[in-house]
Image (cartoon, rainbow, N blue to C red):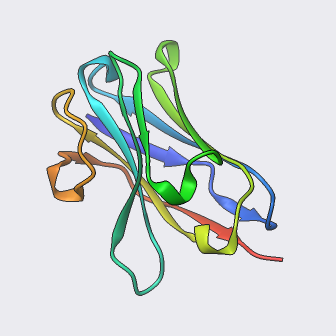
Amino acid sequence: VQLQASGGGLAHPGGSLRLSCAASGSPLDFHAIGWFRQAPGQGREWVSSMVVRERTTLYTESVKGRFAISLDSAKNTVYLQMNALKPDDTAVYYCAAHRYSVVTTTPRDYDYWGKGTLVTVSS
């Protein structure tokens, strides 16, 4: 599975961005997808996951109610809609796929990774 993340950029506090994770090589229905982020000087943090075939979604506490993960099956693309952005959301965001439909919050459990996309939240 090849993953391509995009959609990062600069947003003001309270603003919104939508990240995309386009997949090729395998239908996403076979996988669990995770979004992670890494702030400067920090470790990689789990943000959200989806078991695609079940549409089960999970979020880390700090983004619940603000972020939403979704799927466009026709485009084989997963999105992360980020609303009410805060400066603490500033990070490089990565999408990743587990080879099976197993949801996990541990980065090392994911088999495929896209290149990151930078999100900067600043006034």
Q: Identify the residue at image location x=71%, y=60%.
A: 85
> Considering depth in this image, is 74 or 44 the residue closer to the camera?
44
List x then y, in percent, for residue 36: 40, 56
Q: Is residue 79 left or right of residue 17?
A: left
| Residue 107, placed above or below residue 89 | above
> Considering depth in this image, is 32 or 92 the residue closer to the camera?
32
Q: Is residue 7 left or right of residue 79?
A: right
Q: Identify the residue at image location x=24%, y=20%.
A: 30
> Considering depth in this image, is 27 or 102 the residue closer to the camera?
102
Q: Is residue 8 left or right of residue 93?
A: right
> Considering depth in this image, is 64 or 114 the residue closer to the camera?
64
Q: In terms of image quadrants, where is residue 28?
A: top left
Residue pushed farthest bottom? 41
List x then y, in percent, for residue 3: 37, 41
Instruction: Locate the N terminus by quadrant.
Output: top left
> How many numbered circles are shown?
0
| Residue 100, placed above or below residue 4 | above
Q: Identify the residue at image location x=75%, y=55%.
A: 84
Q: Identify the residue at image location x=75%, y=51%.
A: 16
